[in-house]
Image (cartoon, rainbow, N blue to C red):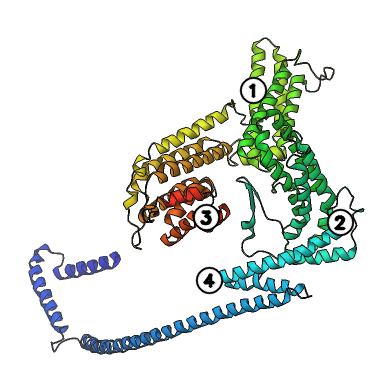
Amino acid sequence: MNSAKSEVDERLIARFNRELGPNLQNMHKCADLVKFYRSELEDLREKITVTSTGCIPSVKSMIEVSRNKLVELDTKEASVDEFEQEITHRIETHDKLMEMVGEKMKKIRELQTVRDYLALVKDIENISQELESSTNAKDDSKPIALYVALSGPNSILDRIQGLDAPNLTMYARNTAFHWHDVLKAKYSAEFEALLKTIKWPNLNQTLEQFNPSKDHINKLVVLAEYLFLLKLPGEQDLLSVKLTPWIICPPYSAPVELFVKPFRQRFQFHFTGNKQTNRLDRPEWYLTQVLSWAKENHMFVGQHFQSPALRAGISDSSVRLQFVRGVVQLAVEKLIVDIEQIATDEALFAHLIDEVLTFEQELKTTLGYPNSYASVVSVLLQPVYFIKWMAIEEKFTTDKMDAMLDTHDPFELLDPANLDELKIPKCADQFIRLLDAIKERYCNLPQPRQQLQFLDLQLKLIDNFRRRLVQLYNDGVNATKILNAINYLGSVLLEWGENVHYLHLHVATFDPDADQVNSVFDGVIEELDHWQRTLVNGLVTWIVHEITARSRPYRHDLWPTMKIVQDAKETLMMSPTASEMFQTTISHLHDMHHELSENVFTIVLRMVAALLDQWMIADMVMNTKFSPGGAQQFQFDMTRNLFCMFGQYAPKPNVYFKKINDACILLTLPIGSAMLLRETLLRETTDDDDATQALREVGMTIFNKTAALEVLDRRVDMPRNG
C-alpha cells in the first residue's frame, strides 16, 4: 500500500514539474492548473451518474443488474415465508398425531404390564400346585427343581426383582418362604436319620475307623445337594447371627448345621450348668474338646460334601471350613457367657488369654482357619475386654523389664570371648526376647487395629527401656555398657523394620507418601501415658459436655408446632437452632480425627456416639413433643446431619446411633401404622416375643416395648389413651 502511494505521489510531482517548468516565475500557473483539474473532475462525476446520458455504459449495466437481483431476492423471500407457514402447519398436524399415538401406546404398555403380571401370578400358582403334588412323591429331585424355578438363579423371584409391584413380590416371597420351610423340614429329617445310621458324630476315632458304607454316603451327598439348593430368598448376609455388637457370624448352610447339631448337644451337656467340666478356671477343657472334634471330622465333611455344594452353585465357600467354624462357634458362644465373670479376676483373665492364644495358633496352623472367621479371640478383641487385656500385657511386660534391670549385673556380656561380634548385654538380649514374645502373641490377631495397639505397647516399652538406661547411666553405670545395650537394641529394631510383619503395620500406621519413613520404629514415640484409658474417658466426657452445653436452643425449639414440608418446591434445611451444637460436633470430631491415632480415635468416636445416642433420647426426645413437621425436621437433623458428621470417619454411622435411628422411625411412622403398633404393644395378649416381632417389622433395632411406647407418646398427633 505504501509503495503504491509513493508511485502516485512521484507521478503527480513529475507532472507538476512538467507543467510549471524549472522557472519559479511560473508559479502563477498553479491557479490555472487547479481550475483545469477541477473542471476535469466535474466531467468525470457527470459521466458516472446513471441518469446522465454520458454515464459509462459498464457502470450503468452493473447497477441495472444489481437492481434486478434485488427484485428477485424479494420474490424469493416471499416464497420462503409461504413455505415456512406450510411447514409449521404440517408440524402441528404431526404433533397432534404423535400425541394420539402416544396415548394409544401407553394403554398398550399398561395392558402388556397387566398381562405379564397375571402371567407371573399364574406361574407362581402353577409351581406351588406342582410342589403340593410332588412333595410326597418318590422323585425327590422334582420338588427341588420346582423350588429353584421359584426362588433360585434366573427364577421367578429374579424376574420380579426391580418391578414396581410390592404385592406381587410379597406374594412370591411368602410362597418361596413357605416351600423353603416345608422342603427343608423334609430333607433335614431324612438327612438326620442317615447321620444316625452312620453313627455320626465321629468321636475319638480316626477317619479310617469311621468308615460309613458307600450307599449311605451317596444318599447323604444327594440330600446335601438338595439342602444346599434350598436357599432362603433375599440377601444371605441378612441371615448373619450377631452374637455381640462386634461379633457377627455369617450363616452356614443347612447340611453343615445338621453336622454341627449333635456336637452342640454334647457341648451343652458337658460345658453348661452345674457339670464338673464347666469351670471358669479351665477354659482349656472345652477349647481342647472343640479342637479335637474339628480335627477328627473336618476332612470327612470336606471330602464328601464340597462337590454337592459346587453343583448347587456354592463356589465361594469351603464346606470343610464352614463345619470347623460351626464347631468353633460353640466355644465362642460359651466364652461370651463366661468372660464377663472371668474378667473380674485378673489371674483367670490372664490364664484365659494364654489358652485362647494357644487355641488360635493350633486352629490356624492345623486346620487353616481364616482370620476373617469369628473365633474365640474375637471375644477378647471386644473393646471392653481388649482394653483389660492390654492392661494385663502392659503390667506383665513392665514387671519383666524391671526384673531384667534389677539383677546383680544386668550388663553382663553373653559371650565375652567373642570380641569381634556384637557385645550383647544380658538385659538387652532379654528385652529383645520380651519384645519378640509380645509380637508372637499378637501377630495372628485378625485386624491391624488390634495389632497396632500391641505395637504401641512395644514402642512404649522401648522408650521406657531407654529411659531406664539413661537413669542407670546417671547412677554411675559405665557408659560402654549403656552404649552396647543401645547399639544392640538399635540394630535389632533396624532389622525388624524390614520384617514383613512390621512392614504391614507400617502400611497401616504411617502415610505411605511421608518423607523419610522407613519402618514403624523410625518414629518411636517419646512417651506413652499408661493412664490412656482414663484420659480417653475424660476426653469423651468433655467433648459430649461441649456439645450438649450448646444444645439448649435446639432442645427448646418449636417441635410441637412445626409444620410438615410437603411442597416439592420447599426443601428441608438443618434447624438453625442446631447450628452451634453441630458446629461444635464437627469441630471436635475433626480435631480428634486429626490429633488421635486411628485406633484411639475409633474408640473415642464410638464412645461419643454412644453418649450422644443416649443423651439425645433421654434429654431431648423424652422431654418434648413432636408434631409431624417437628418429627420430620428432627429426623432430617439426625440422619442427614448428625449421622453424616460421623459418616466421615465410619462406614456405617447409623450403627452407632441405634436409639436415635429407632426414635426417628417411630416419630415419622405414618399415623395409621403408629396407632396400630401402639395398640399391638398395649394389648394384654401381646407377649415379649410378639412385641419384639412387631417392633422388628417396623425397623426397630434396639428399642424394647417400653421404650417404643414412650417415644410414640411424644407424638402430638397420637390420640391419648382413654
Q: Amino acid at mark 2?
A: Lys
Q: Helix, strand, or loop for circle 3?
A: helix
Looking at the image, tell me whether mark 4 or mark 2 is earlier in sequence order.
4
Measured in 3D between alpha carbons, the distance from the residue under mark 4 to the one under mark 1, in whole angstroms, is: 68 Å
Label 3 belongs to which residue? 695
Q: Local crowd at mark 1 within 10 Å, few (<14), some, or many (≥20)?
A: some
Helix, strand or loop at mark 1: helix
Does the CB distance between marks 4 and 2 fall below 8 Å?
no
Can you say whether 138 is above or below 271 in the image? Answer: below
Characterize the local packing of mark 3: few (<14), some (14-19) or many (20 or more) Cα atoms within 10 angstroms.
many
In this rendering, does residue 310 appear at all? no
Give residue 205's position: percent from left, percent from top.
89, 49
Marks 1,2: beta carbons within 8 A: no
For marks 1 and 2 on the same chain, the one whose residue lies earlier in the sequence: 2
Taking the image as shown, residue 545 lies to the left or right of residue 466, namely left
The residue under label 2 is 199
How far apart marks 4 and 3 lie (CA) works out to 22 Å
Residue 68: image x %, image y %? 23, 89
Residue under the point 70% across and 44% down: 332
Mark 1 — residue? 464
Q: From the viewer's perspective, is the residue at label 4 or at label 2 nearer?
A: 2
Of callouts 4 and 1, the N-terminal one? 4
- Residue that numbered label 4 is attached to: 167
Percent across and percent down for residue 177 are 63, 66
Depth check, mark 3 against mark 1: the one in front is 3
Q: CA distance from mark 2 to mark 3?
A: 43 Å
Per the model, the C-alpha gap separating discs 4 and 2 is 47 Å
In terms of image quadrants, where is residue 419? top right
Q: Residue furthest right?
A: 209
